[in-house]
Amino acid sequence: MEEPGLFSGIFEPIEHLMTVVLNALYSLTELLGVPNYGLAIIILTILIKILVYPLTKKQLQSMKAMQRIQPQMKKLQEKYKDNPQVMQQKLMELYQKEGANPMSGCLPMLIQMPILMGMYYTLYSFDYGGAAPSFLWLPSLSEADPTYALPFLSAATTFLQQKMMSNTSEANQQMRIMMIIMPLFIGWISLQFPAGLVLYWVTMNIVQIIQQWWTNREDGKEVA
C-alpha cells in the first residue's frame, strides 16, 4: 500500500523518528520473548500518551471549565445580544473570574497534531521487514482488518472518548450530531486503513479514556 503523499514531506523527520523508535520497541519485544510489531505499536502509543499527558490534562481541564460556565455564557449572550462589544467584555470578565480560557484547549491540540500526523504517515505503509506482521486475530498489520473488529473498536472508543469529554446534557444539537457522525466516519475510514494504523488509533483512544477518567477523579478529589 502506497503512502499518501500529501504533507508527507513536512512530517518526514517525525516519521523517521517514529520508525526508529518502533523498530527499537520491536527489538525490546524480541528480548522479552514475544516479538510482535502489534505489541510494539501499543507500547509506543502508550509512551506517547504518557509524554503528552501534561498537555492533555491542561486541555481536558480547560474544556471542563468552559462546559461549567456555559449557562452563564448563554445568559450574558442573551442579555447583551444587541451590544456585542459589552457582551465580549462581560464574557472576558467571566473567563477571568472562573479561570477559563476558550483558547487554552487549542494549544495542546496543536502541539500534539504533528505527533499524530507523524504516526499516521509512519504506520500507513510501514515496512515490517521479514517479521510476520500478524497480531492477535489480525493476519497482517499492513492490511485492513478482514473481520471489521478494529474498525468497530475505533468507532466505539471514539464515541466513548467524545462522550466523556463533553457534557451531553448541556451539548447543543450540533454537538450531539457530531458525536454520532464522527465515530461513524472514523469507523468507515478504518475499514480501508492498514490494521496497524487503526490499532494505534484504538490504543490512543483507550489511553485517552483512562486519562480522562483519572483527570475527572483528581478534580473530584480537589472539589471534595
Image: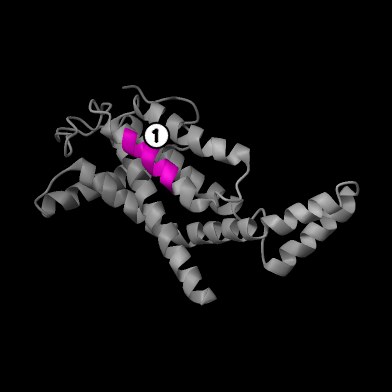
Residue type pointed to by label 1: Tyr
Q: Quadrant of the N terminus?
A: top left
- Residue 214 among magenta residues: no
Question: How far across and how far down the image is residue 219, in percent?
Answer: 50, 69
Question: Which residue is under mark 1?
Answer: 121
Question: How far across and how far down the image is residue 143, in percent?
Answer: 26, 26
Front position in the image: 158 or 121: 158
- Residue drawn at the location 19% of the way across and 33% of the way down: 138
Q: Residues within 10 Å of mark 1 (few under 14, many from 20)?
A: many
* Residue closest to the far right: 83
- Residue drawn at the location 44% of the way across and 36% of the way down: 183
- Residue drawn at the location 39% of the way across and 47% of the way down: 205
Q: Is residue 46 visible?
A: yes
Question: How far across and how far down the image is residue 130, in percent?
Answer: 14, 32
Front position in the image: 170 or 45: 170
**Above or below: residue 181 compared with residue 19:** above
Left or right: residue 105 compared with residue 6: right
Front position in the image: 134 or 4: 134
